Image (cartoon, grey):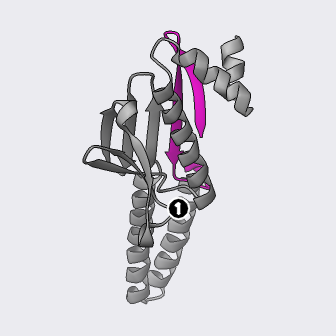
Amino acid sequence: MQSVWWLDGAVVRHWRLTRNCAMAPRSFMLHLCAIGGVLAILGTAFWFLGSTVVAGFCVLQIFVVFGSGLLFAVHATDGECITLYPDKLVVQLYDGLHSRSYTWHPHWVRIVEGRGRSKGCFWLCHGNTRVSVGRHLSLYRRYKTAAEITRALRMCRNCSAVDWPYNFARSDQLLGNSTASSILRK
């Protein structure tokens, strides 16, 4: 989602493109613990009945369930943060425990749509560097976000550093985007 705010008299645009997790972390962990508890009760019951093979498989299932839950929790915050300042574009990528950050001049960045098998994918390109954007968004939101970023980059290129915030807000008023307009009126 896009947000707009002021920083030292300049408009800053920010997009946070993350994976859509349907469950809150607390409810996810409670469900995992409930599954683990049921498996532990079943394993203990079969152990007392003399079926050690079933009890062993229940223990194996507990490890698999909690291992997959841990893997899901590590990747639940995957995504990209794109922040456009008047003089730089900052792209931060989060993938599990790894994160990368790129800082580019916004006049030299272009957004490219994939072709062939990668149709629907978008990349931010700067020189030889190409970064995939919106990997975790639906196709509709990916196109909408790419259009917003393209429009913001174009506005940044068309306006000088001195009048960029003012012209940027005026163009949003003309296009009907009330987010920047309401911030500028305050």
Residue at x-position 53% and y-position 34%: 152
Q: Which quarter of the figure is the N terminus placed in?
A: top right
**x%, y% of residue 39?**
51, 73
**x%, y% of residue 87?**
39, 22
Task: Report if residue 12 lies within the magenta region.
Answer: yes
**x%, y% of residue 179?**
69, 27
Residue interval drawn in magenta: 1-26
Above-or-below relation of 61 to 170: below
Q: Disc 1 marks which residue? A: 32
- Please indicate whether residue 175 sits to the left or right of residue 115 in the image: right
Label 1 is placed on what type of residue? Leu
Judging depth in this view, the residue of 87 and 47 nearest the camera is: 87
Above-or-below relation of 76 to 106: below
Residue 70 in view (yes/no): yes
Q: Which quarter of the figure is the C terminus placed in?
A: top right
Q: Residues within 10 Å of mark 1 (few under 14, many from 20)?
A: some
Judging depth in this view, the residue of 4 and 39 nearest the camera is: 4
Above-or-below relation of 99 to 182: below
Residue at x-position 50% and y-position 22%: 159
Residue at x-position 45% and y-position 37%: 82
Query: For the view shown, which residue lies furthest in the front direction?
Result: 158
Judging depth in this view, the residue of 73 and 30 nearest the camera is: 73
* Label 1 element class: helix
Task: Report if residue 160 lies within the magenta region.
Answer: no
Above-or-below relation of 156 to 2: above
Residue 178 in view (yes/no): no
Residue at x-position 40% and y-position 74%: 59
Judging depth in this view, the residue of 13 and 66 nearest the camera is: 13
Marker count (numbered): 1
**x%, y% of residue 98?**
30, 47
